[in-house]
Image: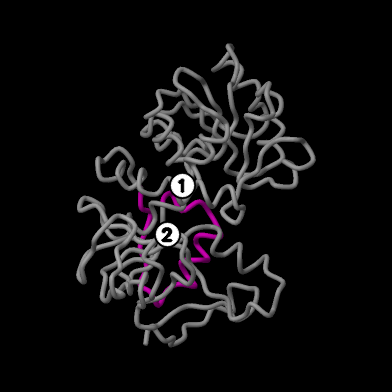
Amino acid sequence: MASAWFATDFSLDSLTEMDTPVPAPGPGEVTIEVRAVGMNPTDYKGIVSGTDREKLPLPLGYEVSGVISAIGEGTWIASGEASVGDEVLAFRITGGYTTALTVPASKVFLKPHNLGFPEAANLLLAGATAAEMLHVTGVSAGETILVHGASGAVGVSLLQQAKLLAVRVIGTASEHNFDTVRRFGAEPVSYGEGLEERVRTLAPEGIAAALDCVGTDDAVDVSLALAADRGRIVSIAAAGRAKSDGFRAIGGTMPQSATFRDGIRAHLIQLAAEEKLVVPMAATFPFSDARKALELLAGTHPGGKLALIP
């Protein structure tokens, strides 16, 4: 048996820790003893925006890191041969808020030795989202792009991956997060009234693409004003505006997004192994404090990633 967190209703107050069975792995599966649970905004958004009561109790969490405790017969993981005791990370799973789980081996990769369990558990959802944003906007070396929400988890990964592409980034943030934006190679600019003019001053030659991680009307309006080609505007948080204004929205549940994100996992792990992609951590919480950690995640900007530690 494992201990796992579920939402029994569509509110954070309904979070309940339950005992849950851990099936023995069959062919093509592995069982992971979880050492860290990655936490993402989609975890709480999936709770508070839910309406289908047939899905309750709702399992939480899409990425973990840990140690293989059992392997199905004849099974290799996504990164190759593996053994019981190997340290791994898994992404695009279901029910990651748990102390142990059995998952498809195709979703499991060896963890780089230089990456701690909390960092490994938070690498891929933000990293794959950022990589897809750069991919769909066709960003290339020498261009100047605008990133809304540059100091958030996806934003920080965007900055690092854009730097590797030799792209200049102007990133919006609050002033107390300017150092974070600079740390990862971008030029910070305050969001809010006057943003369009401030960006035009920094980039009189223009903005090639706008990548939105926040979804506010202000961010969308400025993107539309500055990027000449709406095909080079993408948002992960403004699907309604994307539909009405003719630009791109992406999300992990979309088939094209899912295919891309599955395909980019190994590359992101290699970047992390080479210390070209880091995961800033804000805090870790005991597994029993899942509700407290989610409340922090849903509230003010935590300043980095969060993880639950069983």
Above or below, 193 against 116 in this view is above
Q: Is residue 241 magenta?
A: no
Judged left or right of residue 306, residue 146 is right
Residue stretch in magenta: 280-304
**Front-most of residues 283 and 116:** 116
Above or below, 278 against 87 in this view is above
Judged left or right of residue 187, residue 284 is left
Which residue corresponds to mark 1? Answer: 128
Judged left or right of residue 213, residue 106 is left
Q: Residue at x 36, y 78 (%)?
A: 26
Return the x and y of residue 193 as percentages of the image width and height. 68, 31
Q: Amino acid at mark 1?
A: Ala
Using the rendered view, name the quadrant where residue 217 is placed. top right
Q: Is residue 301 magenta?
A: yes
Using the rendered view, name the quadrant where residue 72 is placed. bottom left
Q: Seen from this angle, which residue lies furthest right?
A: 244
**Mark 2 and 1 residues: CB-CB less than 8 Å, in contact?**
yes
Above or below, 35 against 239 in this view is below
Q: Residue at x 57, y 64 (%)?
A: 44
Return the x and y of residue 234 as percentages of the image width and height. 62, 37
**Front-most of residues 91 and 173:** 91
Location of the C terminus (image quadrant): bottom left
Q: Residue at x 41, y 54 (%)?
A: 305
Return the x and y of residue 276 as percentages of the image width and height. 30, 37
Which residue corresponds to mark 2? Answer: 91
**Front-most of residues 136 and 299:** 136
Q: Residue at x 33, y 63 (%)?
A: 65
Q: Amino acid at mark 2?
A: Phe
At mark 1, the secondary structure is helix
